[in-house]
Image: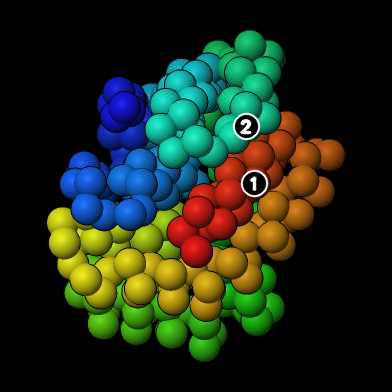
Amino acid sequence: MRCTPSALRGCASVRVAEASGAHALAPGLGDLFALLAAAFATPPATLTARAWCESLAEDLGDVGAEIELETASARSELRRVACGALGAEPWLVEYSRLFLVPPVHVTLNTGMYLEGGLAGVSAQMIAQCYATAGFAQREDFRDLPDHVAIQLEFLAALLERHAGGDGDALAMAREFSDGFVAHWVGPLQSACAKAGEDRPAAAVYAELAAVLRGALDRLR
């Protein structure tokens, strides 16, 4: 079963095609990486917290059922926020308070988790991986190459290539995941969980990081 496109999924810059039965990896896994990429990217200013959370909860339910990955905890947290006091507020405001406005509570530039700084060796290595694979960062996304959303888009793009019959794409996705994403997803989840004491939206992203960890296990 394919996911129904939603307002949130429309933000993702990649779409993963259906794979034939000859491919062992579930095609929905690429959909999940694309969905999580959209979730960690800056949300449109027009989306309220209720619209953003409800849309994501629905899509997570669809993709999770398709690949048999547990997403109930994340969906529960999303619906809790959607029905709460933040529901009518722009989700961009909560996203900015957590990730963008100094002092930043949680960083989405993963070099901080991998080596404790920005624009360092890990960001350069990640950019080189993109270049080697012929993957181009979106022109409207002005951030460092180690941003969470861009890395997840990269994985989704590689799985799309795998679905299309590229024999090297799956190995590249697994190597990138093991070399980078698997090392920062735990610290990101912990940082979000800690920030949840002051920023209600952080609990949502902690749950999304947990879903990402499950997706990485499926990719291995």
Q: Position of residue 11 (x, y in %)?
A: 32, 39
Give the colour scheme of this rendering: rainbow
Q: Position of residue 86 (x, y in %)?
A: 64, 19
Residue topped by disc 1: 210
Which kind of residue does numbered mark 1 sit on? Ala
Q: Is residue 14 left or right of residue 193?
A: left
Contact, mark 2 vs mark 1 (Cβ under 8 Å): yes
Q: Which mark is residue 74?
A: 2
Badge 2 or badge 1: first in the primary sequence: 2
Q: Residues within 10 Å of mark 2 (few under 14, many from 20)?
A: many
**Near-viewer residue (84 or 217):** 217
Q: Position of residue 65 (x, y in %)?
A: 46, 29
Give the spatial CA distance, label 2 vs label 1: 8 Å
Quadrant location of residue 181? bottom right
Residue 196 in view:
yes
Would you place residue 215 above or below residue 172 in this image?
above
Q: Residue furthest front?
A: 22
Residue 105 in view:
no
SS type, badge 2: helix
Would you place residue 124 above or below residue 106 in this image?
below
Q: Is residue 134 left or right of residue 192?
A: left
Q: Is residue 188 left or right of residue 7?
A: right
Q: Position of residue 53 (x, y in %)?
A: 52, 24
Which kind of residue does numbered mark 2 sit on? Ala
Location of the N terminus (image quadrant): top left
**Near-viewer residue (15 or 7):** 15
Q: Residue at image x 29%, y 63%?
A: 158
Q: Residue at image x 22%, y 53%?
A: 22
